[in-house]
Image: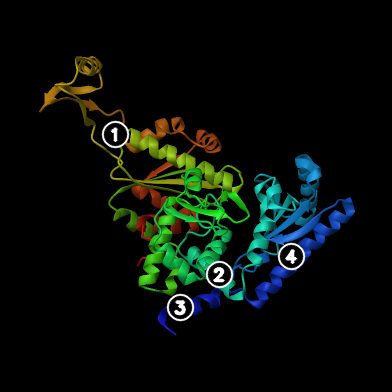
């Protein structure tokens, strides 16, 4: 056995669910299925209950706490009937501890014996062509995978999921923008094994990869046009119109490619089991910030009560608005990131070359040989302007002017203009009620937010992927 096989064997030992985990999962499934079935009988409705997701396909990995239970209802009920009847059944099955979410259909997310159970009403359709919404497609995914996976391939899928999780690119939710479990299954099927998949990924080029297991498209022109905005295209075997990799961001795809190359060159169990970041003391956080060099700003505000995907969509949009604001006023941004505990706090973190910039900036105008109209417009705008410190004057062969920047301190800019940036509407509402700004060593006081935040900040300041040491 070579070093690589030894590492994969070791990884599989931690990725395969134990018999005790399987027993607990089955116990929760039995409980929920019985509750759903009981309510179906009580209502006298025509419906079926079905377990879906990675548990149904036996591709789940040890430590997973997610179970998907689908309530399959007849199409004749219509959307209103699905929501009324389906959600009544789902609420009953969930018990006391649950929240409601909404994708294309409403669903219930219950916490049962420490497992997160999504109870999802959907329409029962006989063929994929009759799909009404995305969740109606899920049973066909389960069927497709189960017809093609054997126990060996299931372990290969677990390796890919474990690798993706270890390097931080697992999860198709908006917060992560990574690989879904179904995408991992399809890639393993397509390439044949974990090692073959990684060898292929190492050669990927964003916007140049097209996977079509069912060979729906003979001519690549159509799909490459239809899906041109996606860095990776993997056609759904049960729906040729859908890209299974649509959630994968360019950032996460690039991280996956880099990690795959690094693992192939230097195999290590670290890719599957990265060392956990430890919590920092106030002194350690203070030292980290003092020695960082660049300026770091954290904006803290309260968190709106929203489903995670909606919340992170709002957070990403607001972070983009903040970045655009800073750049539009000449602050040289190095990086930007965000954190939330999804309950009480949101933190936006930006790293600038400096949060203080010179008062004066040079603004270049037209060449002296340019047309009279453009030169006259430039001169008319700047001669006598209160924002002009010096000029207009000729420098070399070009008109230039030296202007006063309206903001030289990023803190002041954020205080005055943040609410005018393009923000998510729910985030803007919270920001309008108040936010706090922390610059450099002031950030150490945010140690009070707890271990999760200090680990996030330490990771941000370090910058390196967790597998690159």
Q: Which residue is mark 2?
A: 158
- Element on which disc 4 rests: helix
Q: Which residue is mark 1?
A: 408
Q: Which residue is mark 4?
A: 29
Quadrant for the C terminus in the image: bottom left
- Which numbered disc flags the more N-terminal residue, 3 or 4? 3
Q: Residues within 10 Å of mark 4 (few under 14, many from 20)?
A: many
- Which numbered disc flags the more N-terminal residue, 1 or 2? 2
Return the x and y of residue 279 as percentages of the image width and height: 45, 62
- Element on which disc 3 rests: helix
Quadrant for the N terminus in the image: bottom left
In screen coordinates, is 11 left or right of 86? left
Q: Residues within 10 Å of mark 3 (few under 14, many from 20)?
A: some
On screen, 368 above or below 141? above
Q: Which mark is residue 7?
A: 3
Return the x and y of residue 347 as percentages of the image width and height: 47, 46
How far apart, in angstroms, are the residues tagged by discs 3 and 4? 33 Å
Q: Tell which of 349 and 61 is nearer to you.
A: 61
């Amino acid at each position: 056995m070579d070093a690589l096989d030894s590492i994969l064997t070791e990884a599989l030992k931690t990725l395969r669910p134990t018999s005790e985990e399987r027993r607990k999962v089955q116990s929760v499934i039995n409980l929920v299925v019985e509750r759903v079935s009981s309510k179906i009988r009580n209502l006298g409705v025509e419906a079926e209950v079905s377990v879906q997701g990675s548990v149904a396909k036996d591709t789940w990995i040890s430590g997973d706490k997610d179970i998907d239970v689908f309530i399959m209802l007849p199409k004749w009920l219509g959307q209103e009937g699905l929501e009324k009847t389906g959600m009544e059944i789902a609420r009953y099955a969930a018990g006391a501890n649950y929240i409601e979410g909404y994708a294309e259909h409403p669903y219930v997310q219950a916490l049962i014996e420490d497992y997160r159970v999504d109870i999802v009403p959907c329409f029962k359709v006989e063929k994929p062509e009759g799909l009404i919404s995305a969740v109606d497609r899920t049973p066909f995914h389960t069927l497709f995978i189960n017809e093609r996976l054997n126990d060996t391939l299931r372990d290969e899928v677990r390796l890919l999921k474990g690798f993706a999780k270890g390097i931080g690119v697992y999860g198709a939710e908006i917060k992560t923008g990574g690989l879904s479990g179904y995408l991992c299954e399809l890639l393993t099927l397509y390439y044949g094994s974990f090692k073959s998949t990684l060898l292929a990924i190492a050669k990927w080029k964003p916007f140049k990869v097209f996977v079509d297991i069912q060979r729906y498209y003979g001519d690549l022109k159509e799909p490459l046009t239809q899906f041109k905005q996606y860095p990776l295209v993997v056609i759904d075997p049960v729906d040729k119109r859908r890209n299974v990799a649509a959630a994968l961001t360019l950032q996460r795809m690039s991280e996956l490619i880099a990690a795959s190359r690094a693992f192939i060159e230097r195999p290590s169990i670290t890719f599957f089991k990265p060392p956990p970041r430890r919590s920092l003391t106030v002194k350690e956080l203070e030292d980290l910030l003092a020695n960082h060099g660049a300026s770091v700003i954290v904006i803290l505000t309260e968190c709106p009560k929203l489903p995670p995907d909606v919340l992170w969509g709002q957070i990403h949009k607001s972070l983009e608005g903040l970045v655009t604001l800073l750049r539009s006023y000449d602050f040289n941004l190095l990086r930007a990131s965000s954190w939330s505990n999804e309950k009480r706090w949101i933190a936006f973190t930006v790293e600038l070359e400096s949060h203080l910039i010179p008062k004066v900036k040079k603004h270049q105008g037209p060449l002296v040989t340019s047309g009279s109209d453009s030169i006259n417009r430039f001169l008319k705008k700047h001669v006598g302007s209160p924002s002009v410190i010096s000029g207009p004057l000729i420098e070399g062969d070009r008109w230039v002017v030296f202007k006063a920047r309206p903001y030289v301190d990023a803190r002041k800019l954020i205080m005055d203009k943040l609410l005018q940036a393009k923000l998510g509407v729910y985030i803007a509402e919270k920001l309008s009620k108040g936010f706090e700004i922390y610059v450099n060593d002031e950030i150490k006081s945010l140690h009070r937010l707890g271990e999760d935040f200090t680990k996030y900040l330490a990771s941000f300041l370090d910058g390196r992927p967790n597998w690159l040491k």
